[in-house]
Image (cartoon, rainbow, N blue to C red):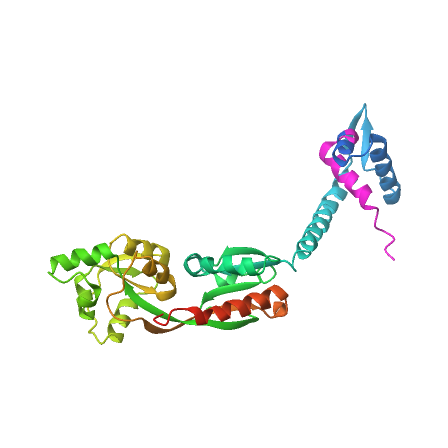
């Protein structure tokens, strides 16, 4: 039995009275009468056997004891409020699905699929967050992460979404311009893989071996690949679409742009890399309904990727 804990109403009245140094203003904030607040403070003072305020000529003055007690009480009230907020959030666990995904993967692959999932499962409220650093993921606030292989989430269950495949892409306008300069047919099937060296190269700064690895996979000799470099895949993709050069892109990121004609891939088929994309979730959330349903649904989507990808 906890005999030395005053009522929460008394503590709230005390905290508000200290901030305002007025029982009247504290009463307005708490939607109580001034006499009710004054009574709660008096009860608290009797409970503690200490004066917390001095009443001087209609002014309220905090005593030294009151100031010391206030410093002790406020963090406790904040903690109680935060605990309640967390519990209120947990009430939403059965209906909220929070996904953290690599920004480009989310934009160019996941988003077109989410509308279909939401239509099939309107009972879930979907929240998508940017995954910038898997190591900083909070398993309390995230249900599922979609990430690049290698950055495995501690205490998580992981499933392979797909092996990574990459392909060399450029804009139709750049292909036509280089073709005209070299007096080649504009049709993409007239291009040979080795003709890629006629194009400006584009790079992702975090994948310095993308072009050399692609060249080796195509049976070509690795050479010099000077060209513009970009920090993120979405920048690289936009640079390719705007005819800055030719880029090595994961097929799941380039697929939509190829299908709508913004990009072409005339230099050989996709190449499999040693990397993979993963779907992961905390062990503690393995049985959550929304996690199970989304996991099974998204893994089934792998079979719908075009055969060339």
Above or below for 48 versus 120: above
Above or below for 189 versus 16: below
On the image, the x and y values in percent for residue 3 come to 88, 53
Q: In the image, what residue occupies the spot 58% across and 67% down?
A: 293
* In front of the other: 99 or 175: 175
Q: Quadrant of residue 282?
A: bottom right
Quadrant in which the N terminus appears:
bottom right
Q: Main secondary structure of the magenta part?
A: helix
On the image, the x and y values in percent for residue 116 come to 51, 59
Left or right: residue 155 versus residue 238 is right
On the image, the x and y values in percent for residue 271 come to 31, 72
**Is residue 152 visible to us here?**
no
Q: Magenta span covers which residues?
A: 1-24
Quadrant in which the C terminus appears:
bottom left
**Is residue 121 visible to us here?**
yes
Q: In the image, what residue occupies the spot 34% across and 71% down?
A: 308
On the image, the x and y values in percent for residue 269 come to 28, 71
Residue 18 lies within the magenta run? yes
In this rendering, the count of numbered labels is 0
Left or right: residue 89 versus residue 99 is right
Residue 75 lies within the magenta run? no
Q: In the image, what residue occupies the spot 73% across and 50% down?
A: 80
């Amino acid at each position: 039995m906890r005999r030395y804990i005053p009522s929460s109403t008394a503590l709230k009245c005390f905290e508000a009275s200290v901030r305002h140094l007025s029982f009247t203003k504290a009463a307005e904030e708490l939607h109580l009468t001034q006499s009710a607040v004054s009574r709660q403070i008096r009860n608290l003072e009797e409970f503690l056997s200490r004066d917390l305020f001095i009443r001087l000529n209609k002014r309220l003055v905090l005593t030294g004891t009151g100031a010391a007690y206030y410093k002790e009480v406020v963090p406790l009230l904040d903690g109680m409020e935060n605990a309640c907020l967390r519990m209120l959030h947990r009430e939403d666990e059965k209906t909220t699905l929070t996904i953290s995904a690599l920004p480009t993967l989310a934009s160019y692959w996941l988003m077109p699929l989410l509308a279909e999932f939401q239509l099939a499962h309107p009972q879930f409220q979907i929240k998508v967050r940017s995954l910038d650093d898997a190591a900083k993921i909070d398993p309390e606030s995230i249900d599922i992460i979609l990430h690049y292989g290698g950055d495995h989430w501690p205490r998580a269950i992981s499933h392979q979404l797909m092996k990574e495949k990459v392909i060399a892409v450029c804009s139709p306008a750049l292909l036509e311009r280089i073709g005209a300069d070299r007096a080649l047919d504009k049709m993409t099937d007239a291009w040979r893989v080795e003709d890629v060296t006629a194009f400006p190269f584009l790079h992702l700064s975090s994948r310095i071996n993308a072009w050399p690895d692609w060249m080796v996979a195509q049976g070509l000799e690795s050479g010099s690949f000077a060209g513009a470099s970009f920090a993120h895949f979405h920048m690289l993709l936009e640079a390719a679409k705007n005819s800055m050069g030719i880029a090595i892109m994961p097929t799941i990121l380039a697929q939509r742009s190829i299908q709508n004609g913004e990009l072409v891939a005339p230099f050989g088929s996709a190449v499999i890399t040693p990397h993979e994309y993963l779907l992961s979730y905390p062990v503690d959330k393995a049985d959550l309904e929304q996690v199970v349903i989304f996991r099974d649904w998204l893994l089934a989507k792998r079979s719908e990727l075009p055969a060339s990808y």
